[in-house]
Amino acid sequence: QVQLVESGGGLVQAGASLRLSCAASGRTRRNYIMGWFRQAPGKEREFVARISWSNGSTYYADSVKGRFTISKYNAKNTVYLQMNSLKPEDTAVYYCAGGSSSQGYEDWGQGTQVTVSS
């Protein structure tokens, strides 16, 4: 079991930047993938970005491509989500998740609120 703890959310104005962090503790597998999801009020949870722990390959949702960057710092077992040019529609609870391509996302954090005002 891997424990994931997010931090870095907050209230910002449109156009601002925020960086979310997700610290992982416990044993991660070699093929571990970590991702960010978000859920806005009244909407379903949606995929934002993911990164492969082994080779660092990344993948983004079209809605954030070019504005958000996912990265990892192996020494701290931490994944980051740098969010630039934030829009009001980015407002959501952001969740960190971990898993594998075969098993899906099995580990979830508690979520961190991001609010973007217009």
Image: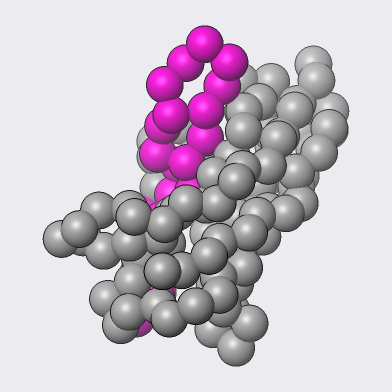
Q: Name the residue at the bottom extreme.
A: 75
Please give the name of the residue rendered at 80% of the width and 20% of the height, measured from the top-left corner.
Answer: 117
From what the image shows, is residue 69 above or below residue 88?
below
The boundaries of the magenta stretch are 36-59
The image shows residue 22 at horizontal and vertical percentages of 61, 61
- Could you say which is closer to the camera, residue 10 or residue 82? 10
Q: Quadrant of residue 114?
A: top right
Colouring method of the image: one colour
Q: Give left or right: position of 39 versus 60.
A: right
- Could you say which is closer to the camera, residue 31 or residue 27? 27
Q: Is residue 97 magenta?
A: no
Q: Quadrant of residue 97?
A: bottom left
- Could you say which is closer to the camera, residue 13 or residue 54? 54
Q: Name the residue at the front extreme.
A: 1
The image shows residue 60 at horizontal and vertical percentages of 40, 47
Task: Report whether residue 81 is seen.
Answer: yes
Q: Quadrant of residue 31?
A: bottom left
The image shows residue 101 at horizontal and vertical percentages of 21, 60
Task: Report whether residue 67 is seen.
Answer: no
**In which quadrant is the N terminus drawn?**
bottom left
Please give the name of the residue rendered at 84% of the width and 33% of the height, measured from the top-left corner.
Answer: 12
**In which quadrant is the C terminus drawn?**
top right
From what the image shows, is residue 117 above or below residue 79?
above
Q: Name the residue at the top extreme.
A: 42
Q: Is residue 46 magenta?
A: yes
Please give the name of the residue rendered at 33% of the width and 71% of the height, measured from the top-left corner.
Answer: 32
The image shows residue 2 at horizontal and vertical percentages of 46, 68
